[in-house]
Every structure is written in structure tokens, then in C-alpha cells.
Image (cartoon, rainbow, N blue to C red):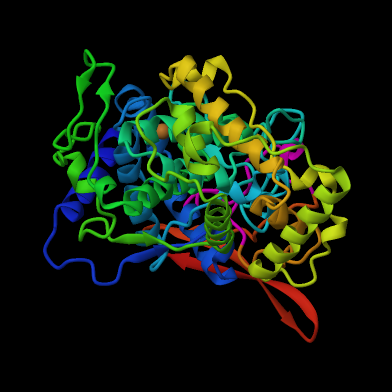
Amino acid sequence: MKISLVALAIAAMGAVATAQQGGCPSPRVRKEIRQLTPKERDNYRRAIYIAHRSNKFDIFAELHVNNTEPAHGVPMFFPWHRRLLWEYEKILSDAVEGVTLPFWDWSMDAIKPENSPVFRNDYLGGNGRQSDNVVATGPFRFWKLTYPHDQPPHFLKRIFTPGPNNITPFWSTEALISFIKAKDNYADLHDTIEDGPHATVHIGIGGDMVEMYSPNDPFFFLHHAMVDRIWALWQNDRSSNFYQYNGVDKFNNNRKVQASDILPTLPSKAQLPVSDFFDTKSAGLCYVYEDNPTWTQAVKALDQRNKSKNNLSRRAPAGNFVSSVIDFLFGSRGDDKKQPPADPVKFEESRKAAAQQAAKDLGYEGLDISKIPKEETKLKEPMKNPDSWNKMNNLDPKKVEEIHAAGNKIIEDLNNDPNYIPVAALYNAAVSQGVVDKPGPAPTEVPPTPETKPTENPQPSIPPSQSPSPAATPAPKPTPAKTGGNVATFTNTVTKDGVPSPVVVVVHY
Ligand SMILES: [Cu+2]
């Protein structure tokens, strides 16, 4: 049953992806999740519930596990995941018309990821509970998952790492932009992003996210949309990047990969080459990523920084990985003269001025720069990948080390620059001070209890000890049993004469 669903989904995708006629006059726009309107956010989550209830969600975990080798630690990583996301997005938009997959620019949250609004219950919810790591609050509380099939169904787990409620720092916007600008070679870019920034987010959220069946967590798709966006940004940065595809397939005698290579899938009629997945604006894919303000600000600020250095060689000459990134950020081949250590008072003053200007550029009106704790104005090193992660994803530990070294060099230099403030520091402060992304009202729609199939007995099957805490979003009213067709219920809260009261909405699909 599962296999045939996967095959069907892929066949459907192939039909669309190969339908090149007609072009893509109005591409779907994938927005940073914080840019969604409350209505769009509700629709996105509703689409996930519907996909989950109609058994179209768990297939992605299976598909991912079955493609561990063909699509991880090898150049196929980017195109294969682009296809996976496309397929998932199609299921979402079939469930709720107009839904497009958002991306999560986790680099905005690099300094203190656990503070990110995305972990609030009005977004995707946070950490698993201490006793058993099960996610027990938020929209995916007690989210029942059937994969792996050889184990009993389990509830979605998250284990913030290193914990208990902290997440390792993520890779900064500045590091990502540096990689995009510095890398002239697809294989280099792929290794860098997969082994470093991509891995850290999986590891930091933990639980299902740190397993090969990570698509069990809706965060997987938000995260990978960001990874896909990084590839798209690199492709569009220079014309020589757009159609580039190179590197070796280490599972195939180090064969050189080609754009005509067929994407590995489960058995399927749709045999599509990598070259079908270069252009997100092709008729088949037809989507673009919307910019987010912090990213735009960081591009501008780094540009200014480089101009003032005036010795930048933007295109790194062939050299080792670390030196090419340093070439981009810090001037030619690391020969940049070390600045004398600044007077600490002057350093802070200068940083403050930089922060004030950047906050103004970002429109963070009312942000009190003096209230930003000093340690939160600095970028921090992401934790090292555990060996288990490198092994599971076929990553070369030496290469991973090298990538982390390059990232840490970027952090060191930016933290020592009196004229620079990382965008994540400002965004993090703006969230803490309630200047942006204030907690929203409770979601206007909450999920049906995952255990309750619409056509089955609506009594929740969660044992009382596992029931959501009273602080969690209230459970929806039971749905009357109905046969034939699929039904989902949501509780809308309407306010009448100042009194909020729940109204059950029944959706047929
Ligand atoms: Cu993957």
C-alpha cells in the first residue's frame, strides 16, 4: 500500500515536471515562514494535517530512508531533495488550494536558535517533553507516525541538542553568503552546505530530525526549503553556476556525475534527469524564493565591508577551501594585515554605532541596542557533527572538519570587527524585546487529535497520562462519525460580545 502511494506520487510528479509547454508565467512564491500572514500559516498547517490524515505524509520518511546512499553525501543531494520538496508541496497544495511550501531561514536564529519564534506553539511548536522526548504541545503534539514500519507507531520526538532546552548555534547568514559568493564549484558548494550548515539544524532539533526518517517532522521540509534556497541563490549568483553539476559518486567507483544522471527514486515511471531540476522557474517546477529582510541586510552590509577593505578578490583562485572563503570575506588570500586589537571601550562604541545603523536599516524601530547582552552580539561556533551523523550521511569527517574551520574563521573575523554587527544578533534582540515577531494569538485553527481518524470512533486514544497539558491548545470537539470521503475538523475561536468561544469547522476533502 505504502509503496504504491509513493509510486503514484512520483508518477504524478513526473507528469508535471516533464510538461514543459506553457512555461511558468506566475511562479509560486515560497516565503520565509515569518512572512506568512496568519491565514497563510493556518492554511499551511491545515494542509499538513490533511496530508497526514490521508496517509500522504509518512511516505516521505520512507522515501528518504530508501534513498540514503543515492542522495546523501553525494552531488545528487541538492537535486534529489529539490524533487522531494516539490512532491511534498504538490500534496500540500492539493490539500489546501494555494498553499506553497514556506522556508525557514534558520540563519536568522543562528545565535540562540531556541529563541526562534518558529518553536512557539503559534508556529511549529518546540522541544519534546523531558520524560520521553515526545512533542506534547503545539500543532504537532502527539503527532502519530507510522514509519519506521518495523517498529510500533510513535509520536513525533524532538530532543534539543546539546539541550536540555538549548539548541547549538546555527550557521550565520554571513557564513552562508560567504559560501555562496566564494564557491565557484558545485561540488564544493554541495559538500559545504550538506556537511556543515544543513547538518547542524538536523542535529540541533534532534529526535526524529536526527534520524534518516527525518521527514517525519514537518520541520524537515521547512529546513530543506532553506537548503534548496541556498542552492538557488548560488545558481543565480553567477551565470556559470546555473547549470553546474559536478563531483563524484563515491558509491559508484567515484564515477564523475553528469547532468543527464537520472534521479534515484523508488520504482517509478518518471525517470527524470538532474537537468530537469536546475531551473526552479521551469514549467515543471515553477517556484521562486522570496527574499527576507535580514538576508538582504546582510548582503548589503557584507558588500560595504568588503568595499571598505578594498582588496577583495571576489572570485577565489584555486586554493584550499578555507582560503577561498577567506578571500571572499577578508581580502586577498589571508594576507590581510591583522588589525591591532581595538580598545575595548572604543570597540563597544563602534559596534553600537554599527548596530544602530543596521537596526535602522532593518526597520527595528524601538530596539534598545544598549539592552542587548554583550555575548548575544557575537556569533557562536556551531557544535561539531556527532560521528553517528557523519556515518549515517556518508560524510567524510576530514572534510567536515575543514568546513567547520572555515565557518569558525568567519565567526572569529566578524566578532573582531568593530564596524560589523551580525544580523542574527539584531534579529534575536528584536524578538527578545518584542520589536518583531511578537507571539501571535492562539492559532485560529487547531488540528484534530491525530489519533482520531475521522471515520473512526472519535474518542481520543491517548492514555490520560499522555494527554496534552491544559496549557496546550485546546483539543477540538469530536467529529461526528461519517462514512465515505475524508473529513477534518478544526476549532475556530470566534469572539462574540468580547467572549471567545470555539466553533467546530468540518472540512470535507
Ligand atoms: Cu535528506
Is residue 200 left or right of 112 when viewed as pictured? Answer: left
Q: Main secondary structure of the magenta part?
A: loop
Residue at horizontal 73%, vertical 80%?
Answer: 495
Is residue 23 left or right of 167 when viewed as pictured? Answer: left
* Percent of width and height locating residue 240: 25, 47
**Per the image, is 463 magenta?**
yes
* Percent of width and height locating residue 191: 40, 29
Image quadrant where residue 339 sits: top right
Q: How many marks?
A: 0
395 is higher (above) or lower (below) than 476: above
Residue at horizontal 74%, vertical 52%?
Answer: 472
Residue interval drawn in magenta? 446-469
Which corner quadrant of the figure contains ligand 1?
A: top left
**Is residue 2 visible in the rendered structure shown here?**
no
Is residue 319 left or right of 340 when viewed as pictured? Answer: left
The one of 489 and 316 positioned closer to us in this rendering: 316
Q: Residue furthest bottom?
A: 497
